[in-house]
Image (tube, coloured by chain):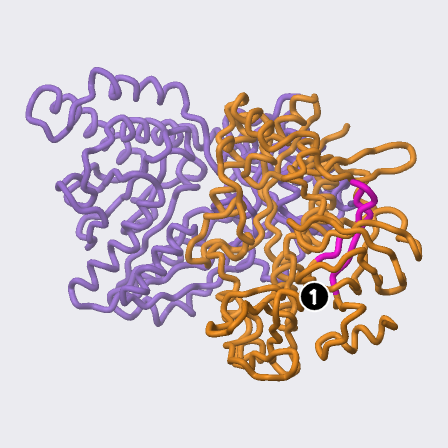
């Protein structure tokens, strides 16, 4: 039986159109965009076209797009770069994050804390509610930045950015959002949701790994994290990865173009998988299942009666089903993630399996995945 | 469907064990056990089970085309092995953590998680031979006498033995390295790991000082001769093991060795090499892989990893086993293993409780000798 990949929220293959667009940038159009000569001008032309394409996909202006080397770097530049800019100006920055942010934001905030920022971590309920009143003080102490993700990577939970933005605006605070799991999955437009900064990455949307961008609304103070040449308007030194930028921008445009139709196609697959698992297994909980808004490409399931969640993932892999648990640590030994602990507490007796869907996922794959999961869970519960 | 789970430390022996199983046509799943948090040790990654070991095991598994996973056993390992290690030193004994791990943690955990993965057999790179017959399974010493590791496996839960495979037990170390080179395995020329995996610095006293705060085992005490004469001071009896010469201070007319550690009085008893010899051993925490030894049965007992075995007669076999040795042996150390063999067949073993000498009655061993009726 052909193995089934249901881990698109971890990463995706680079789609053919993207590979084709990148190829010339690795070959004849190899120049350094900073060079004066024709090779340099050719590369710079492609880079700026990519910037325009990425900006359009997000409803931004090209001058507001900074290409960086991945989503993690983008999050770090937003949170830590903003915090450092405040410290350099002699202020004590206040950073507010949700308790289910990606490690890239969590640890960047922690670093900002070491460097003098006050960090407030907001609890989130399984239905996606954030107690904004609890954030009031932190948002009111100028300067303040709230970093709250658009879509949570482990559960698909969509967070209430609109309400947060209103509150932040009333208190004079800025908002950054990690949209790595949102672009191409749900509508993302910085005109409609007026965040100050937004992070995106290429490899979750069929673009290349190691590519990302930060949307920075004009006038947002930021200090660079990487020092060197003045590339990306002084915010990201180092010769630009033109192929990467071209790949990211095209992947982003295609993902945004296909967002509505893909969401309409994936939502029933997600619902079908949830239905099959709940019908065949006791002790199954759809994580964040009560939330009013969830991204269509993620189904996170809590399964009771499994002593060792990591063994479940390994057993599923051996049966040909590739999925994730919570976050995996460096060495591959899985433990309950900070996200699941934040949503369901440290003593939650459920093992987590995250199924995530993509362009190649169809109903047959979902039904087969359900049957493998039911069989393996049965075996583990018996063991 | 039958799968074999192979424990891969990232060393050459388990790499070749995995390769041999793949070659034999088994469906093989490799695992590396993550036993403790390496980032908390100053020199992490040095030993075979460090993160380097994990990545080496992954590279080998990838080259062999088999899946590889990491089992995080930190909690169980800490409780069953490290805590025991610390407790034993605190009691003035000298533990065998690898024996403890094999018996209490490693194989039990591999079997339990292996079942979850649909594996009904467990393999490792130990140099021992295993025979599965209709009459049962038995473990024999590895073919390479210099590398034999049967000593470390006496504590295996007997119910697990029928499901075990030791593919390199029929090979010598040189043959294992040759096979690894032929297969182009990255681990072919990796040096042997000698240290205890959770003591990568090689000095277990660092660990004791972290874990035993203001404990009598780390308080100064007297170094005494068997006649009661105080000949020096020490900085904590946990730093000593029976048979040790170093750390006693110099200036003695003759070479002195640790004969015994007395935790109640914090004394370290020392004496000459002659005084180190014992010929009666009491063994506790017994484990038998087949039938328990009968009263009066003659077997061979191995009292240290590298020590040659010595013939012994079973003089009592209740909760504890009492053995009379055919000839006295030096530095028989409480806490270490007494491993019983019948020829090259591993029968089982236990932990040494105490040792005595039949024809000598020193203050050190008088009580023990008395209880043996000597």
- Horizontal side of residue B184 vs B289, given as left or right: left
Residue A338 visible at all = no
Query: Which residue occupies 36% across, 38% down?
Result: A201
Colour given to chain B in the rendered image: orange
Colour given to chain A in the rendered image: purple
Instruction: Determine the residue located farthest toward the top in the rendered image.
Output: A28
**Quadrant holding the N terminus of chain B:** top right
Decide: is A346 above or below A216. Answer: below
Where is residue B132 shown, x and y percent of the image?
Answer: 83, 33
Q: In this picture, which residue range is highlighted in magenta?
A: B337-352
Decide: is A167 above or below A56. Answer: below
- Horizontal side of residue B329 vs A182, given as left or right: right
Mark 1 is surrounded, within 10 Å at the Cα level, by few (under 14), some (14 to 19) or many (20 or more) other residues, namely many
Decide: is A263 above or below A310. Answer: above
User: Who is closer to the viewer here, A28 or B291?
Assistant: B291
User: Which residue in the protein does label 1 denote?
Assistant: B334
Where is residue B301 shown, x and y percent of the image?
Answer: 77, 52
Query: Which residue occupies 64% across, 59% down?
Result: B81
Residue A87 visible at all = yes
Where is residue B97 shown, x and y percent of the image?
Answer: 63, 57
Query: Which residue occupies 24% across, 17% down?
Result: A27
Q: Is residue B97 magenta?
A: no
- Magenta stretch, overall SS: strand
Instruction: Determine the residue located farthest toward the left in the rendered image.
Output: A36
Q: Chain of mark 1?
A: B
- Horizontal side of residue A185 vs B328, given as left or right: left
User: Who is closer to the viewer here, A86 or A210?
Assistant: A210
User: Who is closer to the viewer here, A273 or B132?
Assistant: B132
**Dot 1 lies on which element?**
loop
């Amino acid at each position: 039986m052909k193995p089934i990949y249901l881990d698109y929220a971890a990463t995706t293959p680079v789609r053919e159109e993207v590979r084709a667009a990148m190829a010339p940038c690795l070959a004849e159009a190899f120049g350094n965009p900073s060079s004066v000569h024709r090779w340099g001008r050719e590369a710079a032309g492609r880079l700026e076209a990519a910037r325009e394409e990425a900006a359009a996909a997000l409803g931004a202006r090209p001058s507001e797009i900074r290409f960086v080397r991945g989503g993690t770097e983008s999050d770090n530049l937003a949170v830590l770069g903003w915090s450092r800019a405040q410290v350099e100006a002699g202020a004590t920055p206040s950073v507010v994050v949700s308790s289910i942010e990606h490690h890239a934001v969590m640890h960047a905030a922690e670093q900002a804390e070491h460097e003098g920022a006050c960090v407030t971590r907001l609890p989130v309920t399984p239905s996606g509610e954030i107690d904004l009143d609890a954030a009031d003080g932190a948002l009111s102490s100028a300067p303040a930045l709230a970093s709250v993700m658009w879509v949570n990577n482990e559960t698909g939970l969509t967070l209430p950015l609109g309400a947060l933005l209103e509150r932040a605006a009333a208190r004079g605070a800025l908002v950054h959002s990690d949209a790595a799991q949102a672009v191409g999955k749900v509508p993302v437009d910085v005109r409609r949701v007026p965040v100050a900064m937004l992070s995106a990455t290429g490899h979750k949307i069929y673009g290349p790994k190691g590519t990302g961008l930060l949307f920075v609304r004009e006038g947002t103070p930021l200090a660079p994290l990487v020092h060197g040449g003045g590339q990306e308007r002084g915010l990201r030194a180092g010769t630009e990865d033109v192929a990467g930028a071209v790949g990211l921008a095209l992947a982003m445009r295609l993902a945004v173009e296909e967002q509505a139709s893909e969401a309409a196609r994936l939502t029933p697959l997600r619902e079908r998988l949830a239905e099959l698992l709940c019908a065949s297994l006791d002790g199954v909980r759809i994580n964040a299942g009560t939330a009013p808004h969830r991204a269509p490409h993620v189904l996170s399931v809590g399964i009771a009666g499994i002593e060792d969640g990591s063994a479940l993932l390994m057993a599923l892999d051996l049966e040909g089903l590739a999925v994730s648990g919570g976050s995996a640590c460096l060495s591959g030994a899985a433990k309950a993630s900070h996200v699941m602990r934040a949503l369901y507490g440290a003593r939650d007796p459920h093992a987590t399996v995250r199924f995530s869907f993509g362009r190649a996922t169809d109903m047959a794959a979902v039904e087969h995945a359900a049957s493998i999961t039911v069989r393996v869970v049965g075996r583990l519960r018996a063991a | 469907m039958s799968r074999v789970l192979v424990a891969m430390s990232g060393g050459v022996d388990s790499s070749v064990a995995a390769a041999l199983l793949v070659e034999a046509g088994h469906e093989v799943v490799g695992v590396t056990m993550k036993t403790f948090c390496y980032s908390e040790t100053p020199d992490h990654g040095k030993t075979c089970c460090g993160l380097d070991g994990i990545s080496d095991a992954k590279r080998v598994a990838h080259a062999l085309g088999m899946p590889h996973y990491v089992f995080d056993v930190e909690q169980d390992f800490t409780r069953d092995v490290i805590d025991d290690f610390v407790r034993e030193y605190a009691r003035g004994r000298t533990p065998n953590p690898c024996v403890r791990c094999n018996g209490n943690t490693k194989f039990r955990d591999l079997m339990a998680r292996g079942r979850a993965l649909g594996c009904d057999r467990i393999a490792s790179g130990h140099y021992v031979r295993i025979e599965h017959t209709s009459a049962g399974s038995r473990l024999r010493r590895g073919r390479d006498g210099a590398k034999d590791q049967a000593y470390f496996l006496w504590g295996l839960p007997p119910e697990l033995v029928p499901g075990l495979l030791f593919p390199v037990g029929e090979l010598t170390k040189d043959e294992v390295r040759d096979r690894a080179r032929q297969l182009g395995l990255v681990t072919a020329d990796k040096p042997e790991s000698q240290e205890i995996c959770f003591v990568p610095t090689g000095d277990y006293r660092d660990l004791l000082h972290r874990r035993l705060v203001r404990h009598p085992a780390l308080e100064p005490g007297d170094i005494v001769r068997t006649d009661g004469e105080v000949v020096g001071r020490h900085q904590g009896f946990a730093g000593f093991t029976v048979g040790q010469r170093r750390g006693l201070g110099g200036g003695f007319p003759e070479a002195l060795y640790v004969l015994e550690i007395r935790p109640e009085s914090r004394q370290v008893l020392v004496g000459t090499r002659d005084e180190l010899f014992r010929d009666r051993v009491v063994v506790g925490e017994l484990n038998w892989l087949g039938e328990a030894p009968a009263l009066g049965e003659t077997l061979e007992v191995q009292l240290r990893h590298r020590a040659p075995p010595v013939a012994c007669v079973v003089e009592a076999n209740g909760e504890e086993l009492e053995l009379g040795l055919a000839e006295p042996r030096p530095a028989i150390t409480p806490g270490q293993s007494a491993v019983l063999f019948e020829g090259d067949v591993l029968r089982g073993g236990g932990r040494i409780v105490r040792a005595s000498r039949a024809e000598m009655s020193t203050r050190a061993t008088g009580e023990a000798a008395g209880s043996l009726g000597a």
